[in-house]
Image (cartoon, rainbow, N blue to C red):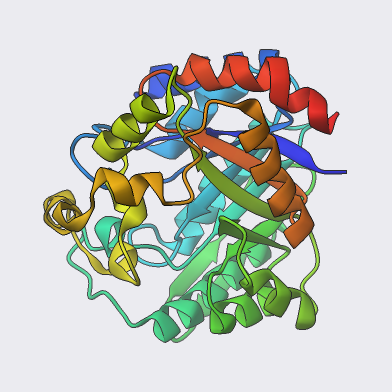
Amino acid sequence: MTEIGYTLSSEEHSPTDLVEHARRAEAAGFDFLSISDHYHPWVSEQGEAPFVWSTLGGVATATDDIDVGVGVSAPIIRVHPAVYAQAVATVAAMFEGREFYAGVGTGENLNEHVLGDRWPAHAVRIEMLEEAVDICNRLWTGREVSHRGEHYTVENARLFTLPEEPPPVCVSAYGERAATAAAEFGDGFWSVGPQEAIETWEDHGGEGPRFCQLQACVAETEAEAVATAYEKWPNSALPGELNSELATPALFEQATQMVSEGDIAESSIITDPDPQAHIDSIQTAIDAGYDHVYTMQIGDDQQAMVDLYEEAVLPSFS
């Protein structure tokens, strides 16, 4: 059965607001929450980037039963995998009795360059991610771990705060190479928008939960929604690998000068105020093979989407 979720957008909202959004989403009947993990917003207009693990502590306290995942972290450069493993274990323990999903990926230069490390090629980052996931899985057993690998060193590390069961590691992938790797060392799949990569993942034996994020802007009119999405999320229309390669919000702002409101209107962002548009987009993701589909509301008015989903969208999938 498909789970329908709501996005906690760390790039647009303060940690306190995100906790309140989580509480409202649970009350409205969403099945799960996904929260982004960023050091910077994509563009300055988005305005926020709180530390995700602190925010999740608040979410755990403010909610009762709703499942949660991080979509996604990159435990390869900015955060050492041994530190990431401790952060995930602590948060998963706070969500005991619910599902907590550890979404991981190869990251973006926007977030990972901040310590002055070199930004490796994608193939190298996949190798780093595989080694990082192996370290995490070993630490989540509660045993002492020492590791001297190609990319990481861990000495006599042992986690004492652990959930009853280790969280599923859902690997983000968009291309064939990443999807193949995700099937080899992940416990699930994570993507933004229905992607053909899920077929590659399945063909290579991928099993587990399958997450898909949709983007929307619910407003009174489609024109208002397009204008808000253009102001707050123009990076969604950038082509190719720019999202993973540009290093600062200022560079994204320069790149998005190429983006027009027309590009936003023609993009995959759902701007039609008709609830059927949201139902159809979710169904498209389900038909593509996803069993966890969640929607991100762009802009300040988060309640508009929560109300629309509670009244007209969620009942279609209950």
Tell me which residue sits at (63%, 72%) in the image: 196
Q: Looking at the picture, does residue 221 appear above or below residue 67?
A: above
Q: Looking at the picture, does residue 298 appear above or below residue 18?
A: below
Taking the image as shown, residue 19 lies to the left or right of residue 110, namely right
Give the percent coordinates (x, y) of residue 238. Answer: 30, 60
Give the percent coordinates (x, y) of residue 30. Answer: 70, 26
Q: Looking at the picture, does residue 231 appear above or below residue 129?
A: above
| Front position in the image: 96 or 281 | 281
Res 46 seen here? yes
Q: On the image, which quarter does residue 103 sit in?
A: bottom right
Q: Looking at the picture, does residue 118 appear above or below residue 280?
A: below
Tell me which residue sits at (28%, 64%) in the image: 109
Tell me which residue sits at (24%, 35%) in the image: 231
| Front position in the image: 32 or 140 | 32
Give the percent coordinates (x, y) of residue 137. Answer: 66, 64
Q: Quadrant of the C terminus?
A: top right
Res 39 seen here? no
